[in-house]
Structures are given as C-alpha cells and as structure tokens.
Image (cartoon, rainbow, N blue to C red):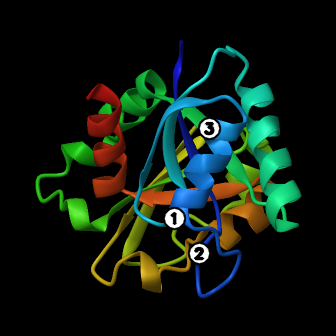
Amino acid sequence: MPNYISLLRGINVAGQKKIKMADLRAHYEAIKFTDVQSYIQSGNLLFNSKSNDEAAVAKKILSKIKKEYGFDVPIFITTEKALKKVVRNNPFLKKSDFDISKMYVTFMSESPDKTLIKALPIHESVDDEYIIDKQTIYLYCSPKGYGKTKLSNNFFEKKLKVQCTTRNWKTLNKLIEMSED
C-alpha cells in the first residue's frame, strides 16, 4: 500500500477552520485509510490507502471534511518518496551559511504557467529568495522569517494562479522521519 502524506492548508490558523487532529485522524480512518498519524496541529497527516490514485485520495478527504465541517480546504497529497526528492533537491542546501530556521517549501497544486513565472518580480523582498522547480517553491526567508515575508501563499497564489501551502524545513524532515518509522 502506498504511504501518503497529506498537507491541508489553512486549518487551525487564527481560530479559523478548526479541526482537532484526533477528529481528523478518525475521519481518515472512517474512509478506510490505515496507520493514520498526524504531526502538529496544522493538517499534516501520514496514512496508507489501497488506492494508487492521489487525486481520488484527495477527493475522499475533501468530501469527508466538507461533510463534517461544511467548508473546503486546499489539500496536497504526496508520498514519502516524492517528499524525500523535494528535500534532496533543495537548491539552498548549497548555501555555505544555510540555516534551517529560514527554509520553507511551498507546494503548488500544479505547475504554473511559465509566462506567469516569468512575470514574477525577481525579488519581492531584498531579504528573501525563492526558486521555483515544477510544483515546488523553495523559499529562504532571512532574517525575519516566514511570518514577515511578502512571499506568502497568498502572494504566489495570486501571481501564479495555483493553490499553495507552505511548510518549514523542520516539518518536512519530521514527516519524512515519521514515514520511515
């Protein structure tokens, strides 16, 4: 069975779209996913499914959330193998002063149109850097961190016309560690 990782965007943020992780794990189990684990309160779940169709898996989750809570949330489904590739291919790892506390990865629902990528400002903020690789944005925020960057999910969604969710470097590595256990 494939080992999936789902990343939900925008739940339990500033009191909006509240879902307890214990309830979310129970919902995943109710739709026949197994070995369900969550990491922190922001919608990171690891699970197994008999399905090999990531889109079908996402649809089941979204349908269950809509039924139980009455709202939609963007969801990104990946696998341990794909997440390891994202981490391994991080171009900022080559920085001599690489600081994990400044590293974030934004996942996009699809590869954006190349003309939209070309139209992006090279540097929205002099302190932040980003590199786009297919459906992934590697974002290095320094020195103020992600909370102060203009290069947020909303920025990239507006400019690239795709849905996004962002995770910090520590979270990605923890999800990989959990998926290996």
Task: Find residue 12 and name its label.
Answer: 2
Label 1 sits on residue: 42
Residue 75: x %, y % from top left: 69, 49
For marks 1 and 2 on the same chain, the one whose residue lies earlier in the sequence:
2
- The quadrant of the image that shows the C terminus is top left
Residue 47, percent from left and from top: 51, 33
In this view of the protein, which residue sits in the foreground, 35 or 178? 35
Residue 106 is left or right of residue 70, and the answer is left
Q: At which x and y percent is residue 10?
A: 65, 69
Separation of residues labelled 1 and 2 (CA atoms)? 6 Å
Residue occupied by mark 3: 29
Q: Tell me whether circle 1 and circle 2 mark residues in contact (CB < 8 Å).
A: yes
Q: How far apart are marks 3 and 2 (CA)?
A: 20 Å
Amino acid on which the number 2 mark rests in the picture = Asn
Near mark 3 (Cα within 10 A), the count class, few <14, some 14-19 or many ≥20, is some
- Tell me whether the residue at label 3 lies in contact with that at label 2, contact meaning CB atoms closer than 8 angstroms: no
Query: Badge 1, how many Cα within 10 Å: few under 14, some, many 20+?
Result: some
Q: Which of marks 3 and 1 is nearer the N terminus?
A: 3
Q: In this view, does 173 lie above or below 11?
A: above
- Any mark on residue 143, and which? none
Query: At x 36% / y 29%, what residue is drawn?
Result: 84
